[in-house]
Image: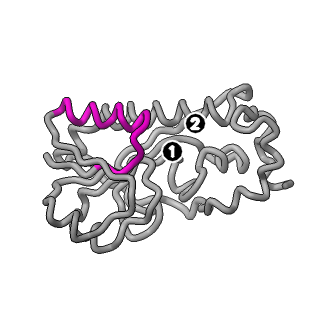
Amino acid sequence: MKILFLGPAKEPQIALINFLLNDGNSITRREEKLNPEDIFKCEFDFLISFGFRYIISEQILDYFKEKAINLHISYLPWNKGADPNLWGILENTPKGVTIHQMDYGLDTGKILYQKEFFFNENDTLKSSYEKLQIGLVKLFKENWEDIKYNRAIPKKQKGKGSFHKSSDKNSYQKLLTNGLDTKIKDLIGKAINA
């Protein structure tokens, strides 16, 4: 299978790419904005987005149809968009990981698989983020065969959930007293009072 993998050349994306290569797939990785003509020429079978920073055009999504998925470190419909880990902690909403089909909205597609996560109060932004990343890769690997052969059963997202832009966190920077090493117990519920 020819897979277009969208995301940075770092861990855990590299581990996921190696997993897909070992499964016999051909992988093209991109992290820059996509040009539809270049994508169509390559005749890809599948698109996987994991940490990709750009919105994918409707033209490209139409090309892949239901064969475009996103790996997101939130428990959708909660914390769509930017910095899902931070917002799950600040707003004390469900935390977890989701593999979903991509549609024209931002993190609004049908859910294929998801798993809720719970952290202890001494976890930090960094440690919780790493646990979510590792958990997301594990969830993907466990379910790749069903995803690949279209055996996953997509489910609509239930409820409105929440959405955040990257700029939303600017007014909360003062709460990150130890940067990414700030403990969860120091952040839970702070979005209401900040």
Residue 175 occupies quadrant: top right
* Side (left or right) of 20 relative to 179: left
Residue at 44%, 62% in the rendered image: 54
Residue 15 location (% of width, % of height): 35, 31
The magenta-colored residue range is: 5-23
* Side (left or right) of 31 relative to 19: right
Residue 18 occupies quadrant: top left
Q: Which amino acid lies under the numbered mark 2 shown in the image of this protein?
A: Tyr
**Position above or below: 173 against 133:** below
**In contact (CB < 8 Å): disc 2 and disc 1:** yes
Q: What is the secondary structure assignment of the residue under circle 2?
A: helix
Q: Which amino acid lies under the numbered mark 1 shown in the image of this protein?
A: Ile
**Position above or below: 184 against 47:** above
- Which mark identifies residue 57? none
Earlier residue among tags 2 and 1 = 1
- In the rendered image, the residue lying farthest to the right is 193
Q: Is residue 9 magenta?
A: yes
Q: Which residue is mark 2?
A: 129
Q: CA distance from mark 2 to mark 1?
A: 8 Å
Q: How is the image coloured?
A: one colour
Q: Which residue is mark 1?
A: 73
Residue 147 location (% of width, % of height): 24, 45
Residue at 69%, 37% in the rendered image: 180
For the residue pair 34 and 163, the one nearer the viewer reads as 34
Q: What is the secondary structure assignment of the residue under circle 1?
A: loop
